Every structure is written in C-alpha cells, then in structure tokens.
Amino acid sequence: MNDNPDHNNKVGAVLVAGAGIGGMQAAIELGNAGYKVYLVEEKSAIGGRMAQLDKTFPTNDCSMCTISPRLVDVDKHPNVEILTNSEILEVDGDAGNFRARILKHPRYVDMEKCNACGDCFEVCPVEIPDEFDEGLGLRKAIHKLYPQAIPNKAAIRKTGVSPCRAACPSNVHVQGYLALARVGKYKEALNLIRKDCALPSVCGRVCVRFCEDKCVRGRVDESVAINDVKWFLSEQETDGDLPEKAPPRNRKVAVVGAGPGGLSCAYYLTLQGYSVTVFEKEEEPGGVLHYGIPEYRLPKAILRRDIDHIERCGAEIRCSTSLGKDLSLQDLRDQGHEAVFLAVGCSTGAKLGIPGEDTLGVTQGIDFLKAVAQGKETKPPGKALVIGGGNVAVDAARTLIRTRAENVTILYRRSRDEMPAYEEEVIAALEERVRIEFLAAPVEIVSDNGNMVTGLKCIRMELGPPDRSGRRRPVPIENSEFTVDADMIVPAIGQIIGRDFWDKLPEIERTRRNTIKVDPITYATSIEGVFAGGDAGTGPGTVIEALAAGKEAAESIRRFLEGEDLSAGRDVQQPVAERDVEGVGPVARNRKQEVAAEQRKGNFEETHIGFDEDAVKAETERCLNCGICSECLECVRVCSPKAICHDELQEEITLDVGSVILIPGFDTFNAELKGEYGYGRIPNVMTSMEFERLLSASGPTEGEVRRPSDGRHPEKIAWIQCVGSRDVTCNRDYCSSVCCMYATKEAIMAREHDSRIQPTIFYNDMRAFGKGFEFYYENASTNIGVRYIKGIVSTVKEEQQTRDLKLTFVGEDGAMTTETFDLVVLSVGLEPSASTGKLGERCGIDLNRFGFAETGEFTPNQTSRPGIFVAGAFEAPMDIPESVMGAASAAALSGELLAEVRKTLVKEKTFTRERDVSKEEPRIGVFVCHCGTNIARIVDVSEVAEYAATLPNVVHTEHNLFTCSTDTTVAIADTIQEKQINRLVVGSCSPRTHEPLFRDVCSEAGINKYLFEMANIRDQCSWVHQEEPEQATVKSKDLIRMAISRAAGLEPIQEHTFPVVPRGLVVGGGVGGMTAALSLADQGFEAVLVERESRLGGAALNLRRSLTGLNVPALVDELRDRIMSHPKITALLDTEPTECSGHVGRFSFKARNRKTGEESDIESGAIIVATGGSEYEPTEYLRGQSDQVWTQTELDRYLHDEPARMEGVKNVVMIQCVGSREPDHLYCSRVCCGTAIKNALALKERDPSFNIYILFRDIRTYGFKELFYRKAREAGVIFLRYDPDRKPVVDEDRGRLKVTVFDQILGGEVELPADRVVLSAAIRPHPETESFGALLKIPRNDAGFFMEAHMKLRPLDFASEGIYLCGLAHGPKYISEALAQAKGAAARAATVLSKELLQVSGEVSVVDPELCASCLTCVRACPFNVPQIDPTTNRAHIEAASCQGCGICASVCPRKAIKLQHHTDKQTLAKIAAL
Amino acid sequence: MNVNYYPGCSLHGTANEYHTGVLAVFRALGVNPVELDDWNCCGASSAHVMNPQAAWELPARNLLIASRGEGPLLTPCAACFHRLKLCRDHLEKRPEDHPHSEAITRVEVVHINEMLLKEEVRRKIVEKVTTPLTGLRVVPYYGCLTVRPPGAVNHPRPEDPLEMDQVLNLLQADVVNWSYKTDCCGGSLAMTRPDVVRRLSGNLFEAAREAGGEIIVTACPMCQANLDTRQKQIERERNTSFRIPVVYITELVALAMRLPETDALWRKHHVDPLPVLRGKGWAA
C-alpha cells in the first residue's frame, strides 16, 4: 500500500473543504493525528447546518450546545487553519501530492484586528434577510453568521460595488447615502457624499446623473431619484458641521481656477492638512457654475453654500487673480507652492466657422450666459436664434426667454433623439415656448451690410450612417438652403481653452484636441509638480467629472508631496454588483414639484421645489441595495480597532496538500418547485429548516412557535413528508433519510414548547431505521400525542381571512378528505449544495445523476480520483452520526495515504520553565477588559479596576480596550514578570472561549497556567443588565472580588505525562474488525486482531451478494488475505479476551486460545471493539416447523450456492419485521427492507414470472436504496402493508403454505399461496456482547448493543477514553456502513497512537489514602468507571489518565478523601465567602 | 410595432368585447395587432379530441401564416394559445411531420399577459395609466389552458402564475391573493355536464368572496363565459348572492388608461361591473 517510490514527495497536510460537523470532525482527527489541516469553508463561519438546528433526535439534545465546544476545539487547534469565505478553484496533482488553488473572497474585515464587539452591527443601516434564520428574520449587512460563530469575527456581505457608485466618475457612495437617508441619518449621509463630492448642493441640482442611468431599479420601472435625495441631504447642513481634518502640515499648494475641478482639489488637499490657495481670474469663485449655469437651475446662494463649506475647512480663494496676467507659474513656485493644480476650464466658445461670424449681434452662448450672470444689461432681442443641441444651447435659449426675447429658436443639425441636452431641460424649454428647428445647419450669417445681424442662412440636413460617436451623421441636402430672420445669433456648439492660456504656458504639453496633456489616472502634466484636470485637462465634460478630477489630483499631489508612487494601486477596479430584479414589484418614482411654465418664464427663480422628508423616505425605500453592503462607511467610523477594510479584493492562494476531503454538506430542496403546497406565496407554509429556526432559542421568535402571517400561536400543525424526496417528477427519486425523524423531533419539540399544539405528520413510510429511532417514533405517537397519517397531501389552499390552510389528502381509508390546519411545515429533502456540481468538476471527481459524489458500496468515502475523499451528505443524504463516522473514515483514508509524512508539517508544543511560587505570598494582577464598548458601555470599567486595587493581595490593576488582543497579552506577560505577579485575574468575557488564551499568557510569563482565574463581566453583567448600568457595575465588582478571593488560594498543578503504547487492539474479526485493523496498520501502527472463531469474516460469512450486486465472499477473502499477509498485523484466531486493565494509551489485555488454552498478553494504546452481531432465529410463522420457511440470509445463500432448492418455486411471500419493531425489541434492524428487495430482484432476474409478495409495515429504503424499491415495484414485486395488530398468518395444508394478510386498501383479507415463506429476521447483538462489555466496563443500550459516548457527535467513542466502536456491535447496519465506521474508529484510535506522550489534565481527582475508608461510594458513582480499589493498598485509586475531571467522586466521598484539583472546597468556599 | 394577431372564433363571436379591448389597448400602447390573413379554426373545440392529426395540423396552418408576418403571434384566447403551443411542441419534437416545421416552430406564440409585460409595452403602460386602479380588489383567475401542461406551454410556475398579477400591479390595482388561480372552472364540460361546471365555478365564487375580491379578471373567453353567464344560476342553487363581475384583463387596462372606446363594453356583461366601478368613481 505504502510502497510508492515517490513517498518522499508526499505532503503531510490535508485540505478539508466544508466546515460543518463532518468537516470539523475530519479536521480534528487529522490535526490530532499529526497532520496540518486547511479547513476551507465558503461561509464566514464554521459550524454548517448543525449550527442552525434546534435540537437533535433521538436524544433531544440542544444542537448548538452540542457543537459549540467542538467549534472552539477547531478554532484553537494548533494544526488546523481555518479559511473562511473560501472555495476550491482547482486541484492539480496526484494522491499524496496535490496542489489546490483556493479563492478567498473578501470578508472586508481584518480578522486579526476584529474583536467582535458588535458596535458595527448597530450602526449598519442595511437590513437583509438573515440566511442563518432561513430568511425569517433580518440582519445587518455587517454581521456574525450566528452569535456563537467561529471565527468570532464580523463579516460584511457585499456582492460588489453598487452599479450607481461604479457609474459615478467620482465614485460617490450612492447606495450608502441612500441607505443612511432611509434611516434618517442625514448628517452622516451628507458627510458620506462629501467624501467624494466637494459640491453636494450643486450636484444635487445640476449633476448629469450617470448613477441614475445605471440604477437597477430602472429595469423594473424608473431609476431611484438619486439626485433629488442628494438635493434634500445638501439642505440638512448646519453651519458647525465640518469633516475630520488632518493636522496642518505647513506645505503650500496652488490651485488655478475656482471652478468645480479646482474647488474639489482644494477641498481634499485642505482636509489632508495642506495650505491651499485657489487663484481665480473672475470676481466670483465657481467658474462655469457661477457664470455658465443660469440661476433658475442653480441659484448663486446654493453655490455659495458649498463654496463656504470649502472655505470654512481652510481653503483660501483669491479672486480676480489670473494666471499669466497677474502671476506666472514661477511666481507660484517662488511663493512656496510645492505643487500646482491647473483647473482653468474651457471658457472660450467654439467658432461656427461660417462667414459673418464677427457681425454685431452674434454672441457666443457662454459669453451671453456670463453677461447675464454678471448682471450686465442686455438689450432684449426680438428674434433670437441659438445654434447647437447641448445644455449650453438650451440654457441660453431659456435665459433668452427670461430676458424677454420675443421669439427664441434653437437650430440643431440632427434630430431630437441625438440631442445631448438633458431631456427635462428640452421639455422645459419647449414648455417655455422655445422652438427647436431640427435637421438644419448654419451656412452664413446674414446682416445689413455687415453691420448688424438680420438673419441666418441655413441648410436642411438628413441623417446618414452613424459616426464615431454612434450618433447618425447629419448630411446636407443639396439645394435646400433657406434663411431665418434673427436679430441675435447665439452659437453654442462647444468650448475650447482660449488661446491666451497657451500663450502664457508655452512649455506645457498639449493634446491634439487642444487640451492639456494629462495622465488619465494621476492627472500629472508634462511639468513635474503641475497637475491639471477638469475641462482644461480632459476636454469639456460634466461637473461630476471635474469634481472627480479634482479629487484624484488632490490624491496625486498628496503622494507627490509625500514622495509616494503616484499611480500605485489606483487602477484597481472592484467588481460591480449584479442584482437580479426577478420578483421586484413596481413602485412609482417620486417627483420634485415643478413651477408652472407660465410662472417661471419671466424670472430666474429656481424652477423646482426639492423633496420633503416623506418623499426622501419613500424614494430611498425604492433602492434595491444592489451591493447589499451600501458602503456607507458607518462601520468604519465606529470600529475602534480599525478592522474594516472595504477595499479588500479577492485573493487566490495555493495550498500543497497530500489529500483532499470534501464535506460540503447539503442544501434543502427548493419547496417552491412543488407549487401545489404554496410555499413562497402562502406565509403559513414553511419549510422544516425554517421551523427549526422558529423552535430555536436563538431564532427570530426566541423559540416561541408563532405563525409568520400574524404571529399567532398555531395549534394544529401539519408536517408534509417527502417534499423533494422519493419524487421522480422533480428528479429526486432518492429518499432523504432524515426527514421522518426530524419531523418527528420537530413535532415533539413543538408540543414541548406549547402543549396546545396538536401535531400531525403526513407520511409515506415512517423511516425510523437508525439507532434509537423506533423507540423515539413509538413514544411520539403513543405518549406524546403526535398524530401520524399515512397519506399524500395533494394540495394546500389558503383561507384569506383567517390565513388557515386547507389540506386535501387521501388517507388510509381511501377517501378524499379536507382538513384545516393553522400552520404547515414541509419536510424538505436534502440535495447536494448548489456549489457541489462546480466542486466536483474542479476536483475532477465523478458525481451521480443527482449531483452526489460517486463512491463504491465497498469503498465508502472514496471518489473516482485517488487521494480525494468525501463524507457526509455529499456522499448520500445522511444523518449527523453517519456524517461524523464518514468524516473520520475519510480522515483514516488520508492517514493511510500519508502515514510516512505524519508530523512533518505540524507545530510541536513548547514548554517554558515555570517559576516556583509556592513560597511566595499571593501577588495578584487584575486586568479588566472594555471589550471595545461591549462591556465599557454599560459597566464603569475604570471604577471596577480602581475597586480591585483596594482588595487584599492585589498588587497591580489596569483596564484595557481589548485584554485579549495580541499586544495586550504580551504586555500582561511583561507585567507579570516585572511585578513578580503570581496570580492572574482577568475580568472580561467567557472562560469557554478565552480561558485557554490567558492560561497561555501565564505559561509565557513563566508561572503555572492554573494560577489564572476569570470573571465573566460581559455575559453576566453588561449583557444581561443592559438596562441597569449601575447595578451591572456593582455586580462586576462582586464577581471580580470573588475571582480575586479564589485566585489567592489557587495552587500550581503539574500535569502528568506518560508514554503511549503504539499498538492498537481490535476485538472481533468480521469485516468491521478486519477493516479497522488494516487501517491502523496502513496508518503505520501495529495492530493485533483477536477473533474468537477459527475463521475471519464474522456475520458477513453468511452473505453472498450486496444490494448493488457486489460479491461479499470476495470482499471477505480479500480482507482476510491482507490481514494474514500484513507485516504490522498479528491475528489471533480462536481467541477470546479474559482480562483488561489500564487506561488510554496503555491498556493491558489478557486473551486465551479457546482450543489450546494458551494465554497471551497484549499491550495496546487503544482498543477497537468490533464484536459484531448475529441473526435472530425466528420462532414465528411456522419457522422450524416447515422447511419451506426460510430466512432472507438462507434465501441469499441458496440462490447462489444451492439453486436446486428453488426448483418448482413460483410464489414467494416475504414477511418483514420478524423480531424487529416488537415491544420487547423496539428497534428496527435497518437492513431487512433492502435485503428483501435485493433478494426479490434476484428472483425476478432469474425468472420474471415469480410471484413475489413483500408484506411490510414501512419500507425503509433510505438514501439511494429507494431506487431499488422503485425498481422492484417496476419489476412486478407486490408490496402489501400489514398492521402490526393484524399480523399475517402462515398456514400449512398438506405440505402447501398459505399466507393470509389483511390488506388495508382493499379492506379485506387476502390469501397468498406460498411455495416459500421468507422471513426478514432481526439482527441481534452478538451473544458475547454482554460479557465482553462487562470486561471492558463499557455500557450497552436496552437492545443490548454497545452504547457510544454520544449518539450524534461521538458515534465511534465510548465514554472511557481510548476505546472505540464499530460494526454490528454498535447496531444493525449494512456492510458499507460498517466499513466506513471501522475506518472511522481506526482514525479515532490513530489520534492516540500517533502521540509519543500523553499529557493528563491537572484538573483531575486525587485520593488521600490516609482518609480513604474504601467504602466504594466513588467506585459506584463515577460515570466513567475510573475509581478502583487498589489491591495493593486496599484504598481507592483514581487513574489520572482516565479521570474526566467531573468532580462527582469528590462531592460524594463521605470522608472528603477525594479532592478535585483546581476545584478544591477551599477555593470554592473562598469564592463564596467573598460574595 | 406590428404583431401578428390571431383572434380565433371566440373573439369574433361571444368574446367580442375581448377583441375590442385587445385592439384598443394595444394600439394605445404602440402595438398594432395585424390579424392573420385567412386564419382557420385552432382545433380547440372538438377537432383535437376527435382527430389527433387535426389537433396539430389546424394550428400549424395558422402558425405558418404567422411565420410570414411580422413579430410574435398574439393570441388572446387561452384555448387557441394552448392549441398553438401544443402544435409547436409537437413539431419541435417531430419536425418530420410537417414540411414547414422549421418556419412554424420559429413563431413565438404569446398570450395577452405576456404581451402586456414585454419591456416596451410595460413601460408604456406605466406611462399611460391615468386612473390607477387603487382600491379595486381584483381576483386574478388564470384557469388551466395557459399554464398546462407546463412542459409544453413552457410555464415556470404552473401552480401560481404571476403574469396577470404583474399587469394588475402596473395598473396599481389591489391584487387579491388566493389559492385558486388555476383551479378548474369546468370549461371543457360546459355543454356535457353543466352541473359539474356549476359546482366547480361555484367553488371559485366562494373562494373569491372569501378572499374579499370585488371583481374577477381573466384572460380566457371560456372561463369568462362560464363564470359570467352561470353566476345567477349558481347563486340560486346555493341560495346566496355573489354579484362578482367577471371581466377581461384588457378591460381593466383600458379602464386604467381611460380609453373611451371601451366604455360601451361594460354593458356586455351578465353580471354588471358598473356598480363596482361607480363605487370607485370610475363610471357614471
């Protein structure tokens, strides 16, 4: 197996993908066995589906309580590295040496810095459906997946930059300010706009709104009125509001031009602390905003408001100072300006290039607008003609109307569709009676002898093919000239930089378009230190483009002055969010009120009235939150550790690993696909997963069962089974295995939560096949009051007034019935999670037609690609214990592959020398944590610290923002050494998560780690007493005082270590035992296999074929051959164990050969119990009286070995549940349904004319076995259901058998002639189970099978450490399941055997032999059977390696001879006395 | 924009008000329905059950005519729509059955709701609604023929179609939620088992009333006829009074856009819609 010549290339690391319960199991097994593990999880936290569940069946344990210790174990495991928000892109290479490419999606939160204080959650304005609560509740865009989430860090849900922000040239956080405005945070919203837009009031009125063009809402109805919201926000300012500003730097920068570009640059440089002077040639600042845009669109006072803000921030604006005329570039340098930004604009109108342009009465559009803005008297013309189709043309026309022109016409050479002016401006102009003459171009100015304009000669145009701009090119129509009368002609066809500018700056490089040549990202010109932007830099553009240029140039200038690279990292584009509009309903856009055309014509009053608060609220509600996170940056503002990084990009990393384990878990079936049940449109129809959250104490209703529609407490609740399972109509013809039991559990829990609830479960077959399930189901139906109806529900209809639900179904009596319920729960099936198809492809493994990973029946957990293993619901729908076993099995497979590179990549624990403090007086250091604001907001932390200083033995106190942060823990260690502190007390959060960390601090500081005590003042004070901060502070002091009192009495404890015997013992030589022994040996450990019979093979020796037709004897032979030839395995046949002693790591075993009587001693570090089971020998149904009554095992054997026995047989009747599901054997034997179907199919294959009847109670073909059930029905096997109260009767009449059964559908008795009756006999524990159990002191359940440590999470373990379990000894199961469990047990054993030394926790019980009276109280009380009477001393002895530290013995010992170290009475009493 | 228009026999006869509404509404929305030249029976009444070949040959001819015209084939009648869709489905699977299968299967058959929801039409509706139907509690009833069989007519949500709801949303009506959108009205038994029709249609009225609906809207001439003409008799049999008018979706679009040419249509209904409309101030 391991003779690969290339083993030197193997990598001692494993990639585990998926961090649910299975992934965590595999990671811990491998981490403990000496491999480096990368645990890759797509979500932001580990825990998977199990974290979402309320309780688990059949023990009703709290799911979260069960897994959260495991979450912590994974989190702090030194060999496990968790990679959240990550997915596999590709796996390259071969078994032993893979290279995996991993894509890490951004979390936008620095995990190193985040302390999970939760301040960010509160300020986040974006609420989205909480996926952890299955969308029943809301959560914020920044969140933790669930309260106990590990890693305990915040994460941001962001699908990319919102399209509106991406469309904005200046990257204004549009979605962010809409979100803030929605929650009424107007001031914050305005500050957010200012971050990227220096002139919010201006932009709120005149921005071209690229954002609205890209607004996704526009695909539904109309875009959000983004600008109007900005307009409203810009009015919210109060004079005092100034943004945060960097400290002054005493460095000067000059900006030339106080238009939008110059103002923007000046603003951002000022905020950076530079001294900025803006030189403006005109009398007023604003540039085109002042002189170009007419007052009715942008009142001067509004412009002034924005400019005032910039000035208040410190920018100086010097008007009437012109570059060139008043000062030169050199002058600026001489005055100490270290950089210059040129934002001179394009203020010269472009010439028409036609004769007569200099005639009196021809005025450039921008010159005209400027004159009006300056208040210069203009003589109202009679007929004015404006040439052009842009905004300047329309502005000029509308201004002419306001300056009382009689008649204004716009002449445009293309058609309306090509007009670049804003649509609403054109409409407003038309309303104000401006005429537009389309498709006409000027040819010549007509004048009275060149003195004064009298008209314009024009020519008609038509549209030709599109030109480079994409618009259709106008082409003159020959001989179509005409003349229009006019006494004023206003050309407005574009602007250029005036010639005088170039004259003044001849050294600067220009473009062919006659603008200043600038770098498109940095805005640097050809002269060092000189930057340019706005119209002068990039040609005539929009206000927002100029603002963007100013902002970017400011950044360039900052970099230039600080000596940084100008362009580094600036062209990185974050991905743009994509938003699906499916299902979004239309909501009308709010509109600003517009002044009527007649009222606005004669004046320059603003034409619109902005939004009120209601309109803002309604409009912001229309935003679709495209990016989910709105990037409002509120989280950045409140995060004290500065952990938020919104610019994080996705990252690709490569991992070298020896094997890959895929455990991605499952999704639940989309119940909307079964439209007849109304899920998704009827609120009171919910999925089982949603109901799970409803039951959960951490769910949206805190565990109260309430209907979604009205919050009412439902009484009648119906569960509908098999929604998306066993259903060919939706391509899911497999059984999901778990739904019968989870529905039963939910029904039980619902009744437990509210005794008025009457649960009803509609089912097809009740599949209670697992360990303990049958009892659970029986108990639910007979004692708890869960009503089970065998029948399929055809429709669910909703009553509109009551919101109750009418269910129509055909019950067992065959009648169509309608019954009304308050709530319906759909038991949705399991399917591979959405991403697994992709995952299969990327990993190069085969999937089955449903998308599950393809594995073999006898090679579970092994995919089509060597070295890549799978487990959990990716293999088939399965329950938690099966997932755990499979995960451990996959770990064993990895361990077998990578045995020789074990421990090559893991960290060894280092130990430091400890100071002896036994002679020292207690010197206590107290550290009180703020936990950001988490504790400090409620508890007066400094007061608590001051108080602690007054207490006895306290030599040092302090309080820290985050006591657990890396720098603080280093400082604490230093303080301990410096002040000779010998007891550490921390008042902070929970020891559950943080005790190990602070114990490590003690070790690092050189004192024993048990000299640490913790007070939980967060959970117990600031969290639970939020409303009473003063009382919370008082209680914090109490808790701290108690902790200090106990700390004074703490003693150092030395942890004991001992060497491990590197050998495993496997008891039982069936397929399970053999597989376990082989796996141990292949993982590099010695194995001893003990079998009481003279032949290996166990129960499998009786089997011939498996369900999928595999050859069982061949499997047994292969395993046996490998066992006998494996150099690391010693197989002892005919041998049974006689004595056992010792503990984990060091067991001593005696065994005796049953034939020779020879005794052997076996030393082992771990034991695997695989003692097997046996078939029940029936006494019912004439078994034993007629040789025509067989068991299924016999039928299987005869079919293959003795076909002659089948001669003359035509009619076969099989009877299920013989010896199973009976009151005295209340368990299901799990394999009988599959076995009966396997044999029935084998018979039908032999001769399709066989009449085969299977008399059953429920057919329990879970998982893909369901496909065989269907196949059997299609093959003509007849299934008849019988009632356990009316069992079938087998009669023999003159050698002929006859079976009589009551058929429920026909409502009468049916007689079946039977040539053979075949009984599906139960599986019982092996007869030796009881005595062997007693030998090892391991417990058994009511049915006699061995009892694992925990039914869900520890299915392979016993409570006693070092002893593991697999195969039929654990309970009935198929061979494939036994194989997986055996490998799993081997993986568990490997975690012990791979250690050279075992360390025993100091928190164990010790016996004082002087006091011990050998009364046996402790021996009887210990749940782990640890205390024993030492035969040499006759006193109780507690083996430290076996002790679990629970303290039960210490509390029951009548003479107080036992003490639990670190939890002594003295210490506890000191704590209580301090209260 | 021109589109092919296949009225079928109902719209030229018993469902004339539907025909008038279709033309008025679409013309107002910038869509010009051009009636197929020389169209023939779609086969929905009896041909499809009597002769399996006629079942697809009859609609194939209509589709072939449409393939020579402009745009998709607008088919307001649910039964015609169903036949045309099934014919296309047949010829997609068995193109060898018809020499012009390629041309026939290229024709896009659209039902009235789909047409109203086409991007450019939808935008026009938003623009042209002058009387939003706010406060009118409308029960959308789809019947079976436009959604089943889902594979052949290609409907993604056969149990809960939403197209008419979306159109009603554009008109800003209060769309009533109910669970009986596609329950059978008994249409195919109209002549043979009127008692069954009355039972099934009666159940629909009960459900519509329970849901608080004021008016039922449909896009199928058969459903409309069943529910409208038999309502009085059902009321007598059940000894109750429903008085729920049953109108075509086009009539509500026309109402919301205030198209004058449809005002006269209200009088064509057995259960008079005017009392409900008067209550809202939309009719004199």
Image (cartoon, coloured by chain):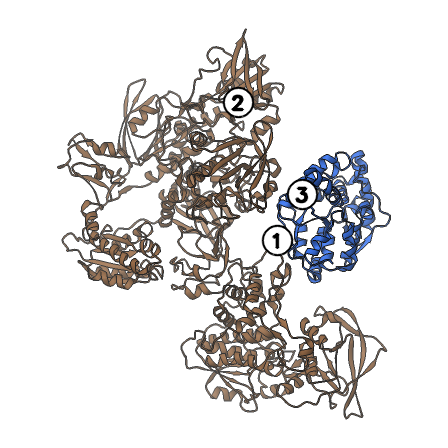
Q: Are marks 2 and 3 on the same chain?
A: no
Chain A palette colour: brown
Image check: A414 left or right of A846? right
* Image quarter of the C terminus of chain B: bottom right
* Front residue of this view, candidates B100 and B18: B18
Query: Is the residue under label 2 in contact with that under label 1 (CB below 8 Å)?
Result: no
User: How far from the left and from the top, in percent, is residue A312?
Assistant: 46, 80
Q: Quadrant of residue A622?
A: bottom right
Closer to the observer: label 2 or label 3?
3
- Seen in the picture, residue A287 relative to A236 is either above or below; the reply is below
Residue indicated by mark 1:
A582
Colour used to depict chain B in the structure image:
blue
**Hey, what amino acid is under mark 2?**
Tyr
Q: Which residue is mark 2?
A: A1282
Front in this rendered view, residue A1475 or A322? A1475
Foreground pick, A358 / A172: A172
Q: Residues within 10 Å of mark 3 (few under 14, many from 20)?
A: many
Residue A1018, x across and y down, in percent: 33, 56
Q: CA distance from mark 1 to mark 2?
A: 49 Å
Task: Tell me which corner region of the image, top left, top right, bottom left or bottom right, holds residue A1250.
Answer: top right
> How many labels were placed on the picture?
3
Chain at numbered mark 3 = B
Q: Callout 3, which amino acid?
A: Phe
Instruction: Left or right? Give the position of A917 relative to A1243.
Output: left
> Hey, what amino acid is under mark 1?
Glu
Residue A772 visible, this orientation: yes
User: Which residue is labeled 3 in the image?
Assistant: B205
Q: Secondary structure at mark 1?
A: loop
Image coordinates of residue A1342 in percent, x first then y, are: 37, 27
Query: Which quarter of the image is occupied by the N terminus of chain B?
Result: bottom right
User: In the figure, is residue A543 to the left or right of A1368?
Assistant: right
Sequence-wise first label, 1 or 2: 1
